[in-house]
Image (cartoon, grey):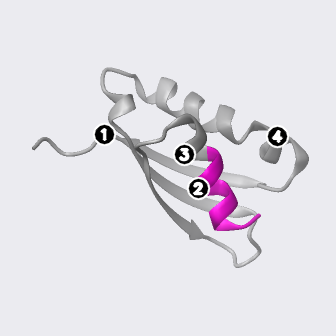
Amino acid sequence: MSPDAIVAKIKAVLPDATVELEDLTGTADHWRAVVTSSAFEGCSLIERHRVIMSALADEMTSGAIHALSLDAKTPPPR
């Protein structure tokens, strides 16, 4: 799966998100994602992951994404 497609899926549910992706194996199916969004304020880590995983549910079940390591965080205070 292309990085642009992953970012688009995440931004569809988290429009203000900054998404950094790393292809861990060079096969475009094992990813590390750092997702930063103000929508995560007040959410637990599991809630943050659920939002991202729901955005990519079809890709995860179809095998387009085989593995996904997540770091979901809020922006630094201004």
Name the secondary structure under disc 4. helix
The residue tagged 4 is 58
Residue toward you, 35 or 45: 35
CA separation in Å, label 4 and label 2 = 14 Å
Residue toward you, 13 or 76: 13
Label annotation for residue 62: none
Horizontal side, residue 32 vs residue 25: left or right: left
The residue tagged 2 is 7
CA separation in Å, label 3 and label 2 = 6 Å
Horizontal side, residue 61 vs residue 5: left or right: right
Residue in the image at 37% along x and 40% along y: 37
The residue tagged 3 is 11
Residue in the image at 76% along x and 37% along y: 57
State yes or no: discs 3 and 2 in contact (Cβ < 8 Å).
yes
Place residue 74 in its image quadrant.
Answer: top left
Name the secondary structure under disc 2. helix
State yes or no: discs 4 and 2 in contact (Cβ < 8 Å).
no
Q: Residue 50, image x and y in percent?
A: 58, 28
- Relative to 35, does residue 53 appear above or below in the rendering? above
Question: Which is more N-terminal, label 4 or label 1?
Answer: 4
Please name which of the two marks, 3 or 1, marks the residue nearer to the observer: 3
